Amino acid sequence: MPKLELHLHLEGAAPPAFIRGLAQEKKIDISGIFDEAGNYRYKDFWDFLKVYEAATSVLTSPSDYARLTRAVLEESAASGVIYSECFLSPDFCGGRDLGAWREYLHAIREAADQAERQDGIILRGIITCIRHFGPEKARETAVCAAETAGDWIVGFGIAGDEKAGKPRDFLWSFDCAREAGLRLTAHAGEWGGPDSVRDALNDLRVERIGHGVRAIEDLVLVDELAERGTVLEVCPGSNIALGIYPTWRAHPIGQLYDRGVKVTVSTDDPPFFHTTMTREYDRLADAFDWDAGVFETLSRTALDAAFCDSKTKTTIA
Ligand code: ADE
Ligand code: ZN
């Protein structure tokens, strides 16, 4: 089944062998982030963020990002993904320097164009600030986003530690991105509860929420999400791997869907969570008895909510 993915972190999609190879080439010792089997090793979400940043530290040039983009899109295409939106962080690509960021972006886009020609998969970018890096760095990130907004950089968002600061601390950055014509999303309702989702919606005025699943703890909010048509970028395998929910059957995506919330399915950081889009679909079908009709609804929701232009949507559809 052709799949659309709206929530994928480019660095978070780096296979561990790819990162190990680059570390060896550059003689950077990050052996502590891998377990005996060669997989990423982390204790909890906050440790995951540290491991993520350590893995990312070996990606030091535009050509590293070009290689990464090719590797990631090959995996996505193998899972039947035809359209993907990935989070890109100028924090990791040249340290928020606009000139450097443009070079990284050029390399990523060239790799994406090549993948589109080869496998037909279409990629677009959402520039993402990192919450625990603070509002000042987020402003610099937003400037990089505003300066490169267009038909390829289509959105702006915020990831990182949801417990660091408040959404309104990032108001300037989101206003700047919105004025540049970028569409908006924010990670919320993953490590924070319903109020965190409300703050992202009301203060940052985002149209999509990354995760958002903990809205289930307040059914008034769930009804509001359904009424407003807010789209959730749900990443069930990520939530289960990080211990937010114990099993697939306990994951709230089934209830959110049944209550009329517009949900979509993504992998977040697939090798960290031992997942792929194919695995997410298979587990959801098993856990909730979802048939092809439900997955078609998810795809239609993702197509409607995608941040790309209508010409691109016509190509996908
Ligand atoms: N960055 C990469 N993965 C993330 C997640 N699941 N939550 C917040 N920030 C992230
Ligand atoms: Zn994420």
Image (cartoon, rainbow, N blue to C red):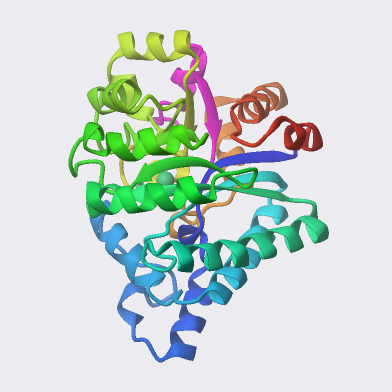
Query: Taking 175 as reference, is 13 left or right?
Result: right
Query: Which stretch appears magenta?
Result: 248-268
Residue at x-position 51% and y-position 59%: 13
- Name which residue lies at 33% across and 28% down: 204
- Quadrant that contains the C terminus: top right
Q: Quadrant of residue 294?
A: top right
**Is 187 or 218 nearer to us in this picture?**
187
Q: Position of residue 44 (x, y in %)?
A: 26, 54
Instruction: Please check the rendered image and state whether residue 298 is part of the magenta-colored stretch, yes or no.
Output: no
Q: Is residue 265 shown in magenta?
A: yes
Write the residue at 44% across / 18% down: 255
Relative to the observer, which residue lies in front, 295 or 10?
10
Residue 248 appears in the figure: no
Give the residue drawn at x 27%, y 38%: 170
Horizontal side of residue 145 vs 33, given as left or right: right
Q: Is residue 35 above or below residue 244?
A: below
Question: Where on the picture, by quarter, is residue 64?
Answer: bottom right
**Image side of residue 104 versus residue 314, left or right:** left
